[in-house]
Amino acid sequence: MKFTRYENVIIKKPLPAAGIVCSNPQRTQRLVNRYFPEAQLHTDSWGIVIYTGSYQGHDMFVASVPMGAGGSGFAFLEMYAAEAHYIVRYGSNDRYLTYSRHQIKVTQCGILIIDDYTLTEMT
């Protein structure tokens, strides 16, 4: 039997095909505020927060998923069951680095590329 979103416990509605997942909720919020200002809250349950929106005409999602093998594995399984096909795991240790600029690119085949420019140490 194939696992579908109808068996999902948390993510009950379909997701866009492509999205970005962070473990840090503040990073997720920064991405949403900067690149998806019209995003809508899709899911907020059991620590998993998912926003859906559009970037350069492409429907996408941005999610915050707590780290931990069991919980994050479960969340990814539910995302794929909810029709996500391309998931980029985006993370770093925010305590030591800050990014002066982010750039998100969507290729013709729908793959997301996130470039970080000018990594600087925080003092």
Image (cartoon, rainbow, N blue to C red):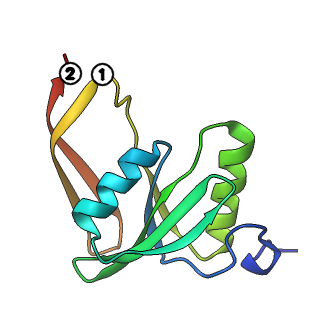
Q: Quadrant location of the C terminus?
A: top left
Can see residue 106? no
Most foreground residue, 107 or 70: 70
Residue at left 35%, top 65%?
A: 111
Residue appearing at x 33%, y 62% in the figure: 32
Rendered residue at 63%/81% (across/down) = 13
How far separated are the C-alphas under marks 1 and 2?
6 Å
Give the mark, 1 or 2, whose residue is nearer the N terminus: 1
Decide: marks 1, 2 in contact (CB < 8 A)? yes
Question: Whole-percent x and y of residue 10?
Answer: 72, 67
Q: Is residue 41 above or below residue 44?
A: below
Image position of 121 with respect to 40: above or below: above
Q: Is residue 83 visible?
A: yes
In this figure, which residue is indicated by the disc labeled 1?
96
**Residue 122: which disc?**
2
Q: Position of residue 19 (x, y in %)?
A: 44, 65
Q: Which mark is residue 46?
A: none
- Residue type of the residue flagged with mark 2: Met
Dot 2 lies on which element?
A: loop
> Left or right of 48: which side holds 7?
right
Query: Measured along the vertical axis of the image, is residue 10 above or below residue 71?
Result: below
Instruction: State the quadrant of the N terminus.
Output: bottom right
Give coordinates of residue 9: x percent, y percent: 78, 68
- Please give left or right for residue 89 compared with residue 119 in the image: right
Q: Amino acid at mark 1?
A: Tyr
Crowding around mark 2 (Cα neighbors within 10 Å: few <14, some 14 to 19, many 20+) is few
2 relative to 50, above or below: below
Q: Is residue 122 left or right of residue 72?
A: left
Q: Secondary structure at mark 1?
A: loop
